[in-house]
Image (cartoon, grey):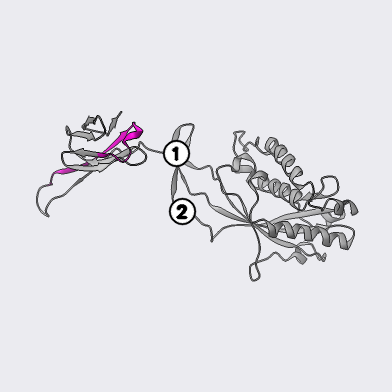
Amino acid sequence: MGAYRRHCTPSGIAERAVAGAALRGQRLGSRRGWDGTRGWEGVVLELIDESLEAFFRAFVPLSATDVDVSFEAPDREWSAKLTRPTVNLFLWDIRRSNDRSRTGMRTVQRNGVPYHESARPVLELRYVVTAWTSVHSDERALLAGLLKALLAQAAIPRDFLPDLFADMDVPVLTMARAGEEHLDVFKALEGQLKPGLNMVVSTEFETGVVFAAGPPVKVIETSVARIGADAGEPRRRVAGEVLDPRAVGVVVRSPIGATRVDPSGRFLLRAAVGDEIVVETDPPLVATVPEVGGVQLT
């Protein structure tokens, strides 16, 4: 175990982190779902485990030749087989986060096609982290290194995550607080006296459930009339798009309304079928309102 202490110095952490990130990019980036398609819904827990191992190996640090990392249940049968210093990260509980819960829908593009998907749920993965060595002082040193890494980093750095996490928030790392529910380490370890760190990893979860989006809204119509009277004149709002970037902020007019081109080059304007819409550029851009749909000016 003395070899562990030789690798507990800050020197070389950056180099090991860079090399580890390159290796993980090859190993984690090629994950496929259980149906053989590219994805990670079915292996998200495995990806989190591997990211945690990479994180702790770099920041404690843990030598690949001297210290093992295991995610198995640390019972007596498991511990009896240990022959080397080992860090055990046992996932004992999964629950949906109350503090970071999200609702609603968002629109995403997949291969150029718009889809709607619900907000990604945020899960709390609860681990108990223990150190296993044959020498008590080495166990304390190893546990202290794990504790320092956990307290020093608020999240798993992006460098230690696979590419499949690129459009997601990085998993947040915290220690369970006093008064919160904890795993009874003494019972979990079948009576073996062992201190443990109660770690919580809060991460988004990609469900993979999406719905095809309908066509974009181009026309909004309303009608105003007195109660009991015939329906009034329809008030139609025509959606427009100006492809000339110089038109941003320019006034757009119709016979019955006016507005400005927004920063995305679009506008909504009250108009009737056959009305001329004029974008007051130099020279002006003119379009006629069709019976259905919006207008595009170039």
- Amino acid of disc 1: Tyr
Is there any visible trace of residue 220 in the rendered image? no
Q: Which mark is residue 115?
A: 1
Relative side of 82 to 30, left or right: right
Front residue of this view, candidates 91 and 200: 200
Identify the secondary structure beneath mark 1: strand
Identify the secondary structure beneath mark 2: loop
Look at the image and say whether residue 75 sits in the magenta stretch: no
- Amino acid of disc 2: Thr
Relative side of 179 to 230, left or right: right
Look at 86% across and 54% down and name the residue there: 5
Q: Which residues are magenta?
A: 231-251
The numbered mark, 2 or 1, whose residue comes first in the sequence reads 2
Q: In the image, residue 67 lies at what x, y percent?
A: 83, 50
In this view, which residue lies farthest toward the front?
282
Look at 10% across and 48% down and name the residue there: 230
**C-beta proximity under 8 Å, tags 2 and 1:** no
Is there any visible trace of residue 9 in the rendered image? yes
Q: Which mark is residue 103?
A: 2
